[in-house]
Image (tube, coloured by chain):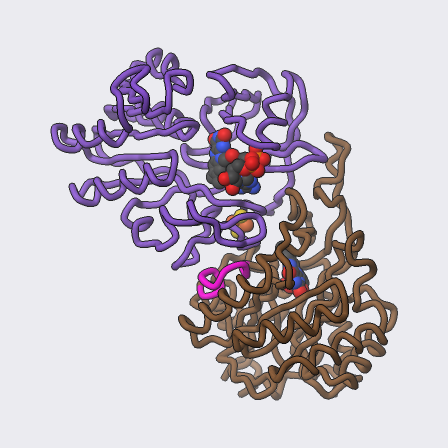
Amino acid sequence: MLTTKLCGIRLENPAILASGILGVTASSLINAANNGAGAVTTKSISLEERKGHNNPVIVTFEAGMINAVGLSSPGIENGIEEVKEFKRRSKTPIIASIFASKTLDFGEAAKRISESKPDLIEVNISCPNVEAEFGKPFAADAKVAASVAEIVKNNTKTPVFVKLSPNVSNIKEIAKAVEEAGADGITAVNTAGPGMVIDIKAAKPILHNKMGGVSGNALRPIAVRCVYDIYETVKIPIIGTGGIMNGRDAIEMLMAGATAVGMGSAVYYRGIDVFKKVCSEIEEFMKENGYSNLKEITGRAHK
Amino acid sequence: MKLEQPIVLPIKKIVNEVSKIKTFIFDHKLDSKPGQFINLWIPGFDEKPFSISYQDDKRFAVTVACIGPFTDKICGLKEGDLVGIRGPYGNPFNLKGKNIVLVGGGCGCGPLAFLADEALKNKINVNFVIGARTKDALLFLERMKKSNIKTFVTTDDGSFGVKGFATDLLKDFLEKNHIAAVYSCGPEKMMKKVAEMCKDKKIYCELSLERYMKCGFGICGQCCMDDSGFRVCTDGPIIKGEEALNMKEFGNYRRDASGKKVKL
Ligand SMILES: Cc1cc2nc3c(=O)[nH]c(=O)nc-3n(C[C@H](O)[C@H](O)[C@H](O)COP(=O)(O)OP(=O)(O)OC[C@H]3O[C@@H](n4cnc5c(N)ncnc54)[C@H](O)[C@@H]3O)c2cc1C
Ligand SMILES: Cc1cc2nc3c(=O)[nH]c(=O)nc-3n(C[C@H](O)[C@H](O)[C@H](O)COP(=O)(O)O)c2cc1C
Ligand code: FES
């Protein structure tokens, strides 16, 4: 009832572990798969090794969380090892997320990570909290986003998803450009903002990076609208991500046009078995409302 | 509602324990259990995990060994300075039986001292084995004496107590006394030996793991152990000895801030 397909890859269910959550090691990704994730995404991997920002890197607030982990990465060699290790030990599809600071490096990262044979590659061009280092995210400009999609496509045979930012005035334009450049799918969205939480007693921003990307409940209505907009514009599949906490939220995202849903912050609010929980909630809804497969739900809000 | 934001507190009192180890006491009711930790935040600088080493109805304390940039910064703080705390985080020790042994190495004695206090309240007989490199690094001798806890000391160089490792003394205990459970915190190589000895003798054993932490509440994935993906921050830091021995990472390697493996 819950199976779905992304570019020919079969997923047992549509609940995908989003990038950056419990995604540092193969063992941790397998733990998420064993807790019901239909696919898992690695934390974004770069060519070179990076430590990320000092702590604190995550803080919650009443409607979600903000994070500035700062794209820590073990470097491509170690990343390849973790993906290979995952493939040795699990049959669940794995999405390798990559990022880079230069367009050319995206191509090199895609080429290298393909050696580990991930099922999909996700290109993170939308991290909002390393602006000082990387300049404005690549996702802010349709031409730049398209050039990254193109170079990645030229360097791998693995299907490529491009992960977009909600912090743009016209996400349709960017989605279109990325599709035309050859992307096989779109992940929408990365965190919004950046936002800031200040401790009033210390009189200091709590995150060491001062600001960070907003995820969780506060992001959901924005993410749903982005997916809705993108679905109207492109034909390629969408992984809808942002603030999904339960089956109801997942159905909403599917109805906006997603083929599968990414979940990150929910792991904090409902535990690592949130994937199992959400899947049974989706199934319950489908039974109660006479749906027999996810295809009937995807894009339903447009009809 | 769950909310991971710091509580900012002034440092009430600082105790110089031994060279390069200090205890920081806060006037704050924490409601933690032995083995749990807090994330200690120096606003604008960094935040890192520390076990609770003392707690009563009004106060709690952490004991810090100055070994690097962050801990040096903490050890330079003065009474009255403000720091933030988040937590308590992690799972606590579970007390079993009426006669137990604690095996501590270095500042690993912090959470064990708190556990010893708790055990006494529950009328459990506590034997505390403290290992240190030299006499100058011995922690909590006075504190244990005051609370009438039987303390046994080993130093690597023989400058105090028995010359050798804490695990040498543990061997005697496991052979001669009726020990219900062993609890250990300290260098991982030491804990591995403790766990192996207890497994041999079929004695219940718990350890406190240490891994690089970012969030501390189970979402970033930085602290996860191979092969199971055990999250040290939320599934641990306390773990059964046998379970630790089944992890290929335990006693062999850990991961640094980037996620790269580093040999122990
Ligand atoms: C659950 C737990 C409880 C701890 N309890 C205590 C305690 O009671 N007293 C005490 O003195 N120390 C404790 N530590 C260790 C303490 O967090 C580190 O010593 C401290 O972070 C070192 O930081 P530094 O900048 O001074 O040194 P660095 O030179 O940066 O690091 C020295 C060592 O500490 C480790 N370390 C550095 N940053 C972190 C981090 N964010 N998380 C985990 N390990 C880190 C490094 O891997 C390295 O092995 C605990 C660690 C954990 C995981
Ligand atoms: C702690 C944390 C780390 C993240 N790291 C990454 C990352 O490395 N790469 C990436 O593409 N997205 C990253 N994200 C964004 C998430 O993948 C996701 O797009 C976003 O959090 C919205 O989903 P959510 O509301 O379900 O968390 C991170 C999010 C969080 C909370
Ligand atoms: S420190 Fe983040 S998951 Fe454990």
Residue at the (55%, 79%) spot, across then down: A119
Q: Is residue A234 magenta?
A: no
Q: Quadrant of ligand 2?
A: bottom right
Q: Nearer the viewer, residue A72 or A283?
A: A72
Query: At which x and y percent is residue B89?
Result: 50, 41
Q: Which residues are magenta?
A: A22-30
Residue A52 seen anywhere in this rendered image of the structure: yes
Q: Is residue B88 at least partly visible in the picture? A: no
Please count the marks in the image.
0
The front one of A13 and B44 is B44
Residue A227 in picture, x, y percent from top left: 73, 75
Q: Nearer the viewer, residue A220 or B241?
A: B241
Question: What residue do we see at 57% from left, 22% from top?
Answer: B26
- Name the side, left or right, on which A116 lies relative to B209: right
Asked if residue A251 is positioned above or below residue B30 in the image, the reply reads below
* A45 sits left or right of B108 in the view: right
- Specify the quadrant of the image occupied by residue A188: bottom right
Q: Residue furthest left?
A: B176
The C terminus of chain B: image quadrant: top left
Q: Quadrant of residue A98?
A: bottom right
Rendered colour, chain B: purple
Q: Residue B18: where, in percent of width, then height?
A: 46, 16
Residue beneath the point at 66% across and 69% down: A241
Residue A25 on the magenta span: yes
In the rendered view, tell whether residue B261 sits above or below residue A76.
above
**Chain ID, brown in image:** A
Q: Position of residue B32 (x, y in %)?
A: 47, 33
Q: In the image as oriented, which residue stretches furthest toward the right?
A: A169
